[in-house]
Amino acid sequence: MEQKNIFLVNHVGYPCTAVKKLVYLGSAEEFTVYRLRDLVLSPVYTGKLTYHSGGEILHAKAGDFSSVMEPGIYRIATKEGNSRCFIIDDRVYEPIARLAAEFFTWQRCNSDFGWHGNCHTQDSIRLKNGEIRFLGKGHHQSSDLRKWTYGTSLGMVGYAEYALREKPLWDHGIRTEEMKHSADYFLSLIMDDGALIDCTWVPEGYNEEKMRGVGFGNQNFPWHSPRMYFESPCPEAGHWNAIRELALVALNLGEKDPEYAGKCLEGAKKIWNYLEGPGKKLNGYKIPVFPPLGHDGIEKYFKGFYEESALRHGSRAAAAQTLYRVTKEEVYYHASKESLRKLAALKVGGNTIDNPAAACYYESGEAEGLANNYIYFFCTTIPQAYAGAIELWPDDKETAFWLESARNIADQLTEVTQRNPFGRSPGSWYIEGNDVFETPGCFSFSTNEKPAFQKFQIGTARPQGEEKAVWYDYNSFCFNLDLLANGVFLAKMGRLTNNPRYREAAQRQLDWILGLNPFDASNVEGVGYNHPHRGIFGEFFPPVPQIPGGVYTGITEESFSMEAQGYDCEYDMPMAGWLLYLLAELVK
């Protein structure tokens, strides 16, 4: 992408005491920050522009104007021009949060408020016991009609965490309604044994033999035909994330609607009991029917979930902590501690100063690869579980161990943010020769057609005793969720340890999302500038419209190719939810 703006800043602005960085693509050696008031620009700060010592992603100059803290409208100038205006104010992100929350309403399924009206009204399943279960409500996850359990629940986890922390004036019960619309769907999925009904979002009448690799052949077909549901467990990650969502809804609604909160808690416990019993035998995921296009590699998303795997331990600890927050029952305290102890045995280990890869985690005791390699599931579980344990049980005899492990991860992330002028963290980590996503799991133009890999070595690991290089990749699929989840974790660690470096790194993840990136492009529809064309794919009609507050999966150089228009940068519900979560953490 040809860069036309030499001033790269957060398009929206910054809270008053936040770190404030500028990446500069010109030749000037100093910059001046001006305040705009009553049509008059007044200089308030002058700083130096020097080449950033870390050359990853882009070799560029950088400046710091963190000392500018007074609320107001600002812009930056050099002898070569000036930036756009931006805002410094402690409430600067409130409009973004409102848009991101409204994105969920637009994405409702089976609701008059959804962007295409009351859709999929006939979705249901006849169970083996003869019961007919209506399976409406919930949310479309991305730029399609699918409601993947593992993704929509993860988005609602972020949404519900935000709802616990922030009380905006515009709410008037909207967020309660949103959480119920999602929770109703997940409660309807729970089978008698506690497992969640599965679905791959193909309509009844779908012929996999004829349509796979070709398409539905009828863009209206996915809208107007009920979807095929299966009386078999959905992916394990969907179960863990559903527990977290339902427990958080119960926590949000405990005083407002105790009866409904009780139903959510009962459902979360039922899923938990399934995973503690017959669900322990889950091993990866075998999809019952493949969608026609773009999902040929989806099963490998879940290869890291099995007995004694790091992702299971991290997911179990995070789910147990959420249940404990609602119930204060000791069984969940002990379950969290048990899982975190087992995680310790899977850490690469060593000195993170000399070898930042030491803070990574093996997929399991027998595996050759890293748990850090899995999209969606590492950054939203293992680091969050350590931080969650420290918050819940600060005086526990094992808190020092949790704190050490959490600091290792935070130090690792902070170290990498110093290697590029944007201060962003990687999206994926893997051992040489063991990148699960060397070939994509799902289609996007960026990853399938012209992969813009930005990978660098971080250190070494010794799987099964043999030393191998560990790499990280900035442009892994769905990397925006990794940035947002890393930001949540780093913001928490900054607060828990009183370490400003962690909080600064958290702000830099948000800066990237809001336009401080090599493309001068906001990742949030309706916020900032230079958005790429959203993914619409032509699989159904009408396609997803532009929805303010939608957050892209991740922008790369290829996202701005003319060929990519319609094939790249789809919205994704987990990113919108965890954007809300990060915004709430940054204002604490």
Image: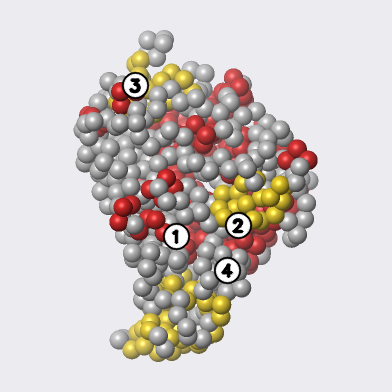
- Please state which of residues 168 and 418 is positioned toward the viewer in this rendering: 418
The residue sitting at 33% across, 47% down in the picture is: 567
Q: Nearer the viewer, residue 483 or 247?
A: 483
Residue at label 4?
A: 55
Left or right: residue 28 versus residue 227 is right
Against 558, residue 346 (above or below) is above
Alpha carbon distance from label 2 to label 1? 21 Å
Q: Residues within 10 Å of mark 4 (few under 14, many from 20)?
A: few
Q: Mark 1 or mark 3: name the one nearer the start of the chain.
A: 3
Q: Residues within 10 Å of mark 3 (few under 14, many from 20)?
A: few
Q: What residue is shown at x 61% (from left), y 37% (from top)?
A: 311
The type of residue carrying mark 1 is Ile
Three-letter amino acid code at the position of disc 2: Phe
Q: In the structure shown, which secondary structural element does the residue marked by tag 4 occupy?
A: loop
Q: Which mark is residue 209?
A: 3
The answer for how far apart the CA atoms under marks 3 and 4 are is: 49 Å
Q: Earlier in the sequence, mark 2 or mark 1?
A: 2
